[in-house]
Each structure stands twice: as C-alpha cells, then as structure tokens.
Image: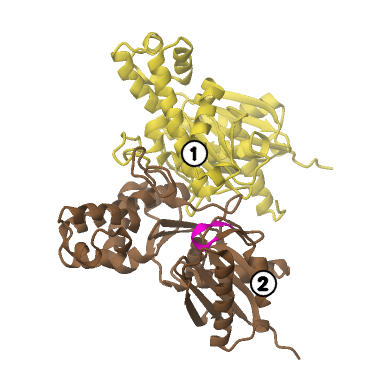
Chain colours: A yellow, B brown
Amino acid sequence: MEQHPSYLMGFDLGGTKMLCGVLNSSYEIVSTTKKKTGDASRSEETFERIVACVQAALDDAGVAASEVVALGVAAPGPIDLRTGTLLETPNLGFQQFPLAERLSREVGIDVRVENDVNAGLYGEYVKGAAGRYRHVLGLFPGTGVGGAIVIDGKLYRGAQGGAGEIGHMIMQLDGRLCGCGQYGCLEAMVSRGAMAREAALLVTNGKAPTIAEKAGTDVSKMRAGVFKKAIDAGDTEVARLVDRAADILGIGMANCVNIFNPEAIVVGGGLVEKLGSSYLDRAAASMRSHAMSHLAAGVEIIAATLGDDAAVVGAAAVAHEHVRESRGGGR
Amino acid sequence: MEQHPSYLMGFDLGGTKMLCGVLNSSYEIVSTTKKKTGDASRSEETFERIVACVQAALDDAGVAASEVVALGVAAPGPIDLRTGTLLETPNLGFQQFPLAERLSREVGIDVRVENDVNAGLYGEYVKGAAGRYRHVLGLFPGTGVGGAIVIDGKLYRGAQGGAGEIGHMIMQLDGRLCGCGQYGCLEAMVSRGAMAREAALLVTNGKAPTIAEKAGTDVSKMRAGVFKKAIDAGDTEVARLVDRAADILGIGMANCVNIFNPEAIVVGGGLVEKLGSSYLDRAAASMRSHAMSHLAAGVEIIAATLGDDAAVVGAAAVAHEHVRESRGGGR
C-alpha cells in the first residue's frame, strides 16, 4: 500500500541567498538548505540554481519528491499569483518567467509562488509570533519596508495580488526620495537604507566614528548590526537617527492601526533582530501616542520569531492550502 | 395565512438631521422621512425623536412594523457593533447608550446599528456606484473625511469594529492640527473643514470675495456650495486652495491603493456633490501619479451615486444580512 505524501517544502528566493526547507505536515522544519543566489543576471542560470537547491534540500532531508505534497516559493514581487509567473525581478534576471510551471515540471512537485513579504507574515501566522490573532499586519523594515496583511486568518492580497505596500504610504508630502520614485514614503524615512543614507552624512561630518570604522561612507555596508555597534559604542548622533526612525515607524504603525483596527502588528527583519526591544518599544510607544486611543488600546506590537525561516514556513503553508483547496478538501 | 414580512428600514442618524427610509427586499426605497435632530444634548430627547421618526416613516409608507424584517441604524462611531450600543456621541448626548436594544423594544423590529460611514459605502455597494467590485474603499470628504472598506464583498470592520479611519492617516509629520488631536492627518488637509479654516485667512486678506459675501469669516458657514460659487465667480486663490486639497486627497487615495490594491475607490460627500468631476478628476490624476503604477492601473475612482440615501440603504442591508445570518439562512 502506497504511503500518503506527508512533507511540504518552502523556498525563499532572495536577492543574495536562497533557502529551501523541508517541513512536516505541522509546518515544523525538518531541515533547511541554503545556497547563494550568486550574480545571476540571467533567468536560466538562476532557475538552474533554484532546481539544484530544491534537489539538495530533498537529499539533505532524505525525502523523495513523491513524498512532498506541495512546494511554496516566496519570491519578490510583482508576481502573477494565479499562474506563479514572476513578472519583473531585475536583480534575479526574471521577466515574465513562469516559475511555478517550470519548477513543477522539473522537480515533480506542485508549486505555488507567493510574494515574499506575504509569505513571511503568513509563516509568523501559522507557526510564529502571530498565531493567536485573526487580523494581523506585518511590517519588515530592512533594505526597504515590507508590508503584509492577514484578515480573518487569511492573507489579503487585493484585486491583483499587489496589496500590502505599506512601506510606500506617503507620510511626508515633501519628504525624502524613495526607491519607488515617490517622495516621503514610510520606507524613505525608516528603512535601513534610509538610515544608512543619513548616516553617511554623519560619517562625512565625523559624527559617527563606529560607522566610519565599520563601513566608511559605503551605505551598502551599513547593515543593521553596524547601527547596533554604533549605539553600543555611545555614538549619540547615530542613536538619535535610529530613535527618529523608530518614532516615524510608530507613526506608520498608527496609520495602519487607524485603517485596519488589527489585533497585532508583527515587526520583523534585520533592524528588529539587531536593535531589539529598545527599538521596537520606542516604535510601539510612538504608535500609541499617534493612533486613535480606542484602537491603539486593542493592538499588540510583537517581534517576529521565525527569522529567516518565516518565508519558508509561510510559502509552504500557502502551497499546502492551495493544494487542499483545489482538491476540494476545505481548509 | 400570515404574510411574510417583506420590508426593510434604514435610519441615518446625523448630527443635524435624521433620515428614515422604508425599503423593499431589493433595497429600493419606498419612501423616506426626514426630521431635524434638533439641539439634542440629552440622550432621552434624541431617542424620543428617533422613535417618532421611525413611526412617522412607517406611517408615510403605509407599512406596519410587523411587515418589517429589520431596521438598520447608521450612527456616528464609536459603536459596540455587537450590542448596538453608542459608546460616545457627544453632539447627540449619547454615552454608553444601548440604542439597538431600546429601539427594538420600542418599535418592535429587529435593530442593528452600523457605523455611518460603513453604511454609506455599503449602500453604494449593494445599490449604488460600487456594486460591480469586490474590493472597494470609500472616502467621504466633508466636515471630516470618512473612510470605509469592503473586502471580498463584505464590510471590513477590524478587530473591535473601528477600522476604516482613513481620514486619520498621518500624511505630514509636522502638518496641521486635526480634530482628532493629531497633526497632519489627511482630514486636517483636505476636509471641507480644513479648507474653510484656510479660506478664512483668504477672507481676512481680501482674497476670497465670494466667500466673504456668503460666509464672512465664519468657517461653519463655508459649505461646499460656497466654495463652488467662489470658483465659478473666478476667485483664483480659492480655486488654488481647492485644487491643492484635491491633489492631497489623491495622495491619500494613492496610499490606499498601495495598501489595499482595490478595484475601486468610491468618493462621496458634499465636496464631490458640489464640486463635481473637476474636483474628482484632479484627485484621481494625483492618485495615478503617486500610487505604484501597476496598482494604479487597476483601480477606478468613482463618484458616489446615492447621496443622502446611501447610509439608509446600507444600514438596511447590514440589518437584513444580520437577520438572515442569525437565522442560519446564509448570505
């Protein structure tokens, strides 16, 4: 008698690394396999590495493809979620690339593609910090500021799958330039990238000695850990800059609280991981003093707990649910 | 054989007037009855007027209470939607007032209370401008800026029923004072009230002759129609002020588009009704130049069509659905 397939896989396709996990049916990770994405400007090269990483993950876990119910891939947007096509992902070389179809054919597993930030929040929902709540937002300040929305226990994707761009909420009409081309977005004020660009001025002016030592004026080297070291070393101007970013992040949270009346906001990403509760508590205090008080009273601000595994777990869960729904098995 | 009750009622409880409608089961209005809310600082007086208005509406329509399936009341928030209790409505004299329970007992009809802005959008959804869409936002710039959300065909109310405060999204960190106590909310920049406070300066400086003639420096008299007359009379400084408000309203819409990826935003209220398409088209153009282009492409900006009837229709529909759901009849 044939054994019922009982494993799931989740794949996080990042710009610098790819992470593939094999999970049991309770969404517990059995093993993970990590590879560098490398300097992949051509889609076929990137695709070959994805296939190799999936196969290595199966080998590492000692699991056969036939034992896997579904494989979820967390990828940067924009994505046609229905077909699993990556519409435009310049740093991975993808343009209108039918990833779900190609990968499914190659590895012999049902594949579902999900936006990486959505997958990250959903991972925290099914297995991490957010499981107790039905209405949860996710904010992930890092290079940019990712946003995602769970409403009534389900990912909210909007009409074309593009919802959740909370980082591109314009919060200063004459504000700083954002990577999206607009001015004054939340991301342009509070992301690690935005903080780095301001810190570069401090370095130039001799006011950020620790950052000068670790990164010089190279903003791409000013990672979250560098800010943490500067604060620990007593660089007061850097501490002020980080505090201000936390305050503004809290105002962005307040806007979300007023709009969504959520039960919780999960905050993840490198800044929270490195800067810890002093950063998150400051943002939460700012939220509470800027949101409508009856709505602020009902919301928890919580740190993500799954770290790099969040998107792997979330993508696996999304793929699993899709398979169950398309087989008519319900939720 | 007893006839099955086949009418619905909707009641819009405003600060200056109350409007009660009797509807057939297709949510078509059979008749409406309007009364002044009056100077009601005591809850019992206001409540008596509400009861009298409901009974007058039944008389006007020639319908008996026993023929009415449900009565929906659209009221200003905050509201405990579960029990239909008005938590705090200072200008109506209500504080922790169990409106649904009291009114139901008095008139002998099942009563459901809904937030008035939610009811307005839901009316446009079930019978007005927004019926073709599953994911729709409502923005109602007037004295303030009301906001409401329909997701997957259902009103989204959030964890405690307080969602949709889009007007209190902070969009200028050092912006103008808002009625909510914060600075820089969308409402503080684009509401009729905000425009009036700026117009008062123009009047003082002799730059708004038409407004000076119609309202002097009394901001409460600067209704939407007064702005319309000033623009029509060629008062260029007033036209600039209104254009700027439309531009910023469009940036607020852009934020909503980036967050929700909706199919449509319905815009209603006095400013849209009086200023018409020149105002709405300008706001829509601003939205399109500030939202992410792939999301802006998929969204329609449409004017509300039901006017004052929207909240009556929406409240009736909400009450009807609640009765059907609680009787297990499905949606």
Classify mark 1: helix, strand or loop. Answer: helix
Alpha carbons under labels 1 and 2: distance apart: 39 Å
User: Subunit of mark 2?
Assistant: B
- At x 59%, y 67%, the residue is B44
| Residue B30 drawn at (x, y percent) | 52, 84
Residue carrying label 1: A253
Residue range (magenta): B87-93
Numbered tag placed on residue B104 in the rendering: 2
B182 lies left or right of B68:
left
Q: Is residue B170 above or below residue B104?
A: above
Characterize the local packing of mark 1: few (<14), some (14-19) or many (20 or more) Cα atoms within 10 angstroms.
Answer: many
| Residue B108 drawn at (x, y percent) | 68, 77
Residue A168: within the magenta?
A: no
Characterize the local packing of mark 2: few (<14), some (14-19) or many (20 or more) Cα atoms within 10 angstroms.
Answer: some
- Dot 1 amino acid type: Met
Q: Observer-nearest residue: B131 or A29?
A: B131
Q: From this viewpoint, is residue B285 visible?
A: no
Residue B88: within the magenta?
A: yes
The quadrant of the image that shows the N terminus of chain A is top right
- Dot 2 amino acid type: Ser
User: Subunit of mark 1?
Assistant: A
